[in-house]
Amino acid sequence: MSSQDSNSHEAAAEEPRSPAAAGRASADRSGTGFSRRRLFGAVGAGAALVGAGAVGGYVASAATTEQASDVVEFRGDHQAGIVTPAQDRMHFVAFDITTDSRDEFVALLKEWTAMAERLVAGDETFADGAVGAGEYKPPSDTGEALGLTASSLTLTIGFGPGLFSRFGLESMKPASLADLQHFPADNLDERRSGGDLCIQACADDPQVAVHAIRNLARVGFGTVSVKWSQLGFGRTSSTSTTQATPRNLFGFKDGTANLKAEDPSLLEDFVWVDEGDDQPWMAGGSYLVARRIRMLIESWDRTTLKEQERVIGRSKGTGAPAGLKDEFAALDLDSKGPDGPLIDKDAHVRLASKEELGGIQILRRGYNFTDGSDGFGHLDAGLFFIAYCRDPLTQFVPLQLALARKDLLNEYIQHVGSAVFACPPGLGESDYWGSTLFG
């Protein structure tokens, strides 16, 4: 588990679209039709007009204002969903590529881009939507998000190491994009690891995030297949100074010293890839590290408060470093108490701190998860750790090695899934997902 301190398909219902069909679908998207936001506004205004006459205009206007305020800009210098203030829910999916056709895969990326831009705006996946396709044809949107707002949805794409072994892309693979080494005590499940590409959907409404991934996977059938996915709830870090520090399933505040969107110089140093780093097509992008970390909840819950705080190195109540009262106080790694260092030499926050790691920092963006029980009455729950960094080999790997070797927290956690992806830069007006790589 990385730092408390921030250094820390559905089967297709229709035949797969050909590149030509994808082009027609793209043209259709500019047409009129029902959208999630239009339907929401129409229902609100209609009900108000029936029940309250002139009040209906106010209701519709208020709904429109609310919907506009929770739309995250899709295009920009960097992909949304990295330094965007962390939303409350996540649906993460890793795909494997099932086609040998570069043209078919690029056509899918273009179609996905058009879909994603509509989805983050609060619209349906295509203009004909869930209700306009005709009764003898499957709807082009699954419909479960009708009436819901955009809910600050962001969609972030990344490419895995395996992508570059096909389509003649070997020379374009960044040196920093390599499968992570096996760390001490890893117990990885290959069914929850790796992937040729990923999409991270974050939103403040779980149904909005699930709807987005469901429809992207549905349209991708025949070109990509889902390898694994993970639902997450309750962010475990803040990516903006406007957000309070959340708590993980062990009950401790998580990510107190995380990098923030308001720290542009630190983001340039530790998150955004520079054009001179390696591959120019990654300039303005970042690397995503995903680790599924199971927490041994039952063992932790039987541990005394004093021991829990020794393991973490912080107060469970306030989040302050051991021996201090302010959550945001600098770590005091030198002071001693009657029983030794105030922060144990193997405490989680010490080993994961930039002070111990020669200044290394990463941007955390993880989520809690609970996936039922394991058949023995134990919760299958924990942290779906996500980190963004400029170079995983020089940032995440040294961090995880330090934690894997000595962290007291290792008695209570187990890393069971692992993946790394290269997330390209943001999109200009005419760009599509992967356009800097595929041209």
Image (spheres, rainbow, N blue to C red):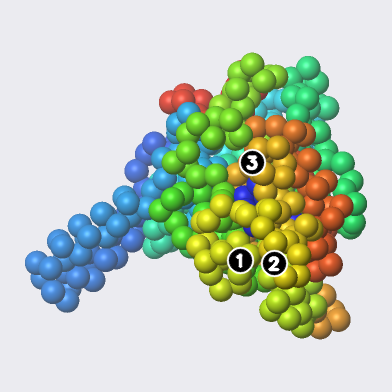
Inspect the image, locate mark 3, and give the three-letter code of the amino acid beneath it. Answer: Gln
Residue 324: image location, x then y, percent: 56, 64
Which residue is found at the position 84% from the left and 55% from the top?
406
Q: Is residue 88 visible?
A: no
Residue under label 2, please give it.
Answer: 337
Q: Earlier in the sequence, mark 3 or mark 1?
A: 1
Q: Identify the secondary structure beneath mark 3.
A: loop
Which residue is found at the position 68% from the left and 53% from the top?
334
Q: Classify 212 as above or below 50.
A: above
Q: Earlier in the sequence, mark 3 or mark 2?
A: 2
Residue 224: image location, x then y, percent: 73, 42
- Front residue of this view, candidates 249 and 204: 249
Inspect the image, locate mark 2, and give the three-letter code of the amino acid beneath it. Answer: Gly
Rate crowding at label 2 as few (under 14), some (14 to 19) or many (20 or more) other CA atoms within 10 Å: few
Q: Identify the secondary structure beneath mark 2.
A: strand
- Front residue of this view, candidates 11 and 384: 384
Quarter placement of the N terminus: bottom right
Residue 273 located left or right of residue 326: right
Rate crowding at label 1 as few (under 14), some (14 to 19) or many (20 or more) other CA atoms within 10 Å: some
Residue 182 located left or right of residue 92: right
Asked if labels 1 and 2 touch by Cβ distance under 8 angstroms, the answer is yes
Which residue is found at the position 72% from the left and 45% from the top?
356
Marks 3 and 1, how far apart at CA: 24 Å
Inspect the image, locate mark 1, and give the three-letter code of the amino acid beneath it. Answer: Gly
Quarter placement of the C terminus: top right
Marks 3 and 2, how far apart at CA: 28 Å
Which residue is found at the position 68% from the left and 70% from the top?
309
Residue under label 1, please give it.
Answer: 323
Residue under label 3, please give it.
Answer: 361
Residue 240: image location, x then y, percent: 46, 49
